[in-house]
Image: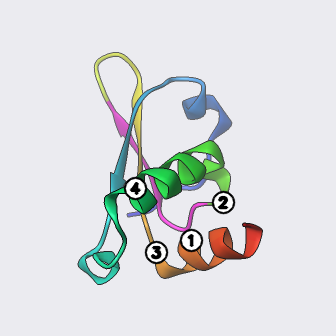
Amino acid sequence: MADTFDPYRERLIMETETVWPEALNHLTPIERVRLEHRLHAEPEKASNLEYIRTHTGFCRKITVTQADLDRLSQAA
């Protein structure tokens, strides 16, 4: 279940994770890395954001959607 952006949890992010659905397998590894950096740079704009509690803080998990790719391609 997706969470809403939380500034408090953002200050406690210790790791990040990006999930790529099979429908987006057409992207090259280089494109994926570039897009991951952009997605995690502005997590408040991610379509599917989840905070996972860890022993030391939180992990920010973003599941990439076509809407995210569309938004990033318009901003480029």
The magenta-colored residue range is 46-53
Residue found at the far top of this picture: 56
How packed mark 2 is, by other alpha carbons closer than 10 Å (few <14, some 14-19, many 20 or more), is some
How packed mark 3 is, by other alpha carbons closer than 10 Å (few <14, some 14-19, many 20 or more), is some
- Type of amino acid under label 1: Asp
Q: Whole-percent x and y of residue 1? A: 38, 64
- Type of amino acid under label 2: Lys
Q: Who is closer to the viewer here, 69 or 50?
A: 69
- Type of amino acid under label 3: Thr
Q: Residue at x 55, y 32 (%)?
A: 9
Q: Whole-percent x and y of residue 75? A: 75, 68
**For marks 2 and 1 on the same chain, the one whose residue lies earlier in the sequence:** 2
Q: Are marks 3 and 4 in contact (CB under 8 Å)?
A: no
Can you tell which mark lies on residue 30? 4
How packed mark 4 is, by other alpha carbons closer than 10 Å (few <14, some 14-19, many 20 or more), is few
Give the vertical position of 64 relative to 25 (above or below): above
In this figure, which residue is indicated by the disc labeled 1?
Answer: 68
In this figure, which residue is indicated by the disc labeled 2?
Answer: 45
Q: Are marks 1 and 3 in contact (CB under 8 Å)?
A: yes
Q: CA distance from mark 1 to mark 4?
A: 17 Å
Asked whether 47 falls inside the magenta stretch, the response is yes
Q: CA distance from mark 2 to mark 4?
A: 22 Å
Mark 2 or mark 1: which is in front? 1
Left-right relation of 42 to 3: right
